[in-house]
Image (cartoon, rainbow, N blue to C red):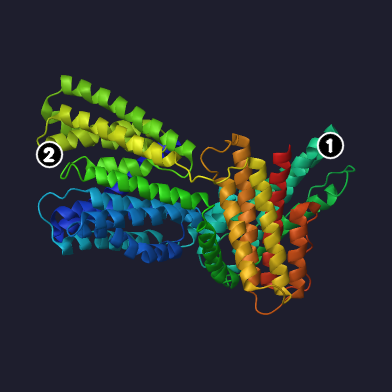
Amino acid sequence: MNAIARGGGMLVAILVVVGGTAGLGVALGLGATAILAGLTALFCFLAATGGPLRPDLWLLAAFAPAVVLGGAGPRLLGEVSVAASIALLALVVFAAALLPALGPRYVTVGLGLGMASVFGYGFQLSGTASPLQILSAPALAVGVVFVLRLVMGLGDPGKPSRAALADALAGPDRDSAERAVRLWLADRPRAWQARVLAGGGRYHGTAALLRDRTRAFDGEQTAAVERVLAAADEQAAVLAEAVRAKKGAEPPAVVRAAADIDLPGDTDALLDEAWDALSAVREALLVRDESIVDFPRHLVREVLRREAAGVFSWRSAQLRHAVRAALGMTVAAVVATFRPGDPLTVSFLMTTFALMQPEWRDTLAKAGQRAAGAVAGAVVLAVALWLLPPGALLPLGIVALLVGFPFLQVKPMVFNGCMVLMSVGMNATTRHLDALSVLIEYLLLVALAVGIGLLFGFAAVPGVPKPPVGQRFADAVAETGDLLSAVARRMRGEGSRREIGLRFRAAVRTHQDLVSPEPGSGEPSARQRAVLDEAGQGLRGLAASAGALLQRDGQSPTMAAFADAAAAALAGSGELPPRPEPADEEERLLADLVRADLLRVHRGAEALAG
């Protein structure tokens, strides 16, 4: 019910964005292109919300030219050459499919860019439109979303970052931890937030390691460790609320609980490590140092550059997905040219684009949902045509849109069925067409889109190996360890930039392949998928920290030794590298992030081995 409620709230926001932008377009004289402006604004809104204000605005500004080019370019070029128009559309879809390789933040950006381009190409304008109107429509959409996002975030620009940090501190699930790192890096990162992030990562990584160890303890030892960790979790939750507040009161002191029994090995030291991490979080909250730390600025650029370099490899699953998506969209666009002026062209092209996913299983699932929803919607519409007068189709389509949208994420099949009623009902009524003929054509186009999506969603590049889960994990760990060792040599004045570049590219490629296996490879279990996602984030974090180490001015024997120790720990020694001494604030922060990521990878290795 909460998901449905959120869907309803999103529906209201989308109606405001689409309706407001389209209305403004009509007032400005955009004519029929006003609906293009409204839908493009929707895609931009989805891509430019959810994060802190400043990075959201920067992201929207950076991709504004691409949105205008994608939304208007193929259509304008089509006036000169249909082949060139389709080629430009395929190029934009190719770029949109590559963007998620840069990180989860770019998933919605790629989706928005691709949908804006496909919609702009397929939308059949009613009446005439000048080139200026076609160009102005996506430009207006970007401008409206920019102003709207600015107004939405002015009251508390950093709220999403604090909320993500609080969620990561209160709960160790992978999604909240990854989101916290991503938003903190994208925003103007404050020093106190960096210490909270590092302390929270150390705490949850150590706590996870301790909980894994209890499998080998006796009942009394397990109960003692769980009791201590439960007390620590309660205090972490209290600290998390202080992080979430815009101006919080002084957090309570961290009161350490003791196990009061003898524990094997270094378990007592790990418990102390967990409490030290929480104490570090509280100290950061007490000081609340609002100064901006320096290293994330170049770290973000370095991470994006390395991720982009890694994806441009023929062994990259993301690159092959982008090639398949571009080819599939080319075929769909060619098919659409045989029916110029068809009002269902947009639905056909958008369905094809939505179906093609990086993983075959996801494509298959979406195809099943789309086909089942179309059939169910067709049955409901057939009954409506039998029982209701023709004039009821338009109101029925509008009601179906309002009812179906809250189910977009929770029940995609219901949403797809409602889209049948909306698309067929509105097109048949506004264009004075036979509803049954439109329905039959709609089902045939859905079947064709499903066929194209499945064909190009499954097609794999010949000769590319498809290793199992364990081998992909081992390859990613080995390449990351080699990268850390190469960085250590470079920090001693040895090695070359070319070697570092090759190591980064190999590491990034194995990280991407770890979580995005090639179609046809062995499907991981639900448990393995969760483990791989968490370990993959840890490995990507280590690569990002390696890039930050390289950005340090001059040589640093201290940090070179730390990087070597981290590589040794990753290779299987199991001992976390000691924090470097002496070290400045940036070096201590880097060390804490590396140690937290190492714990995540170790936990993943133990879970896979078990």
In the picture shown, does residue 73 fall above or below 525?
below
Q: Mark 1 sits on what residue? A: 217
Residue at 56 percent across and 38 percent down: it is 521
> Quick check: can you spot residue 20?
no
Q: Residue lying at the far front in this picture: please name it.
A: 463
What is the secondary structure assignment of the residue under circle 1? Answer: loop
Q: Nearer the viewer, residue 23 or 469?
A: 469
Residue 290 percent coordinates (x, y):
57, 70
Q: Which amino acid does label 1 sit on?
A: Phe
Residue 430 badge: 2
**Which of the pair 367/334 is nearer the observer?**
334
User: Which sits earlier in the primary sequence, circle 1 or circle 2?
Assistant: 1
Q: In x, y percent, where is residue 318? A: 49, 51
Q: Can residue 193 be seen by looking at this rendering?
A: yes
Q: In this view, does 165 lie to the left or right of 48?
A: right
Q: Identify which residue is drawn at 32% across, 60% down.
A: 67
Q: Which residue is drawn at 57% across and 67% down?
A: 299
Q: Which residue lies furthest to the bottom in this view?
A: 554
Instruction: Pick whichever, 302 or 482, lies toward us.
Output: 482
In this image, 468 relative to 80: left or right? right
Q: Indicate the quadrant containing the C terminus: top left, top right, bottom left or bottom right.
A: top right
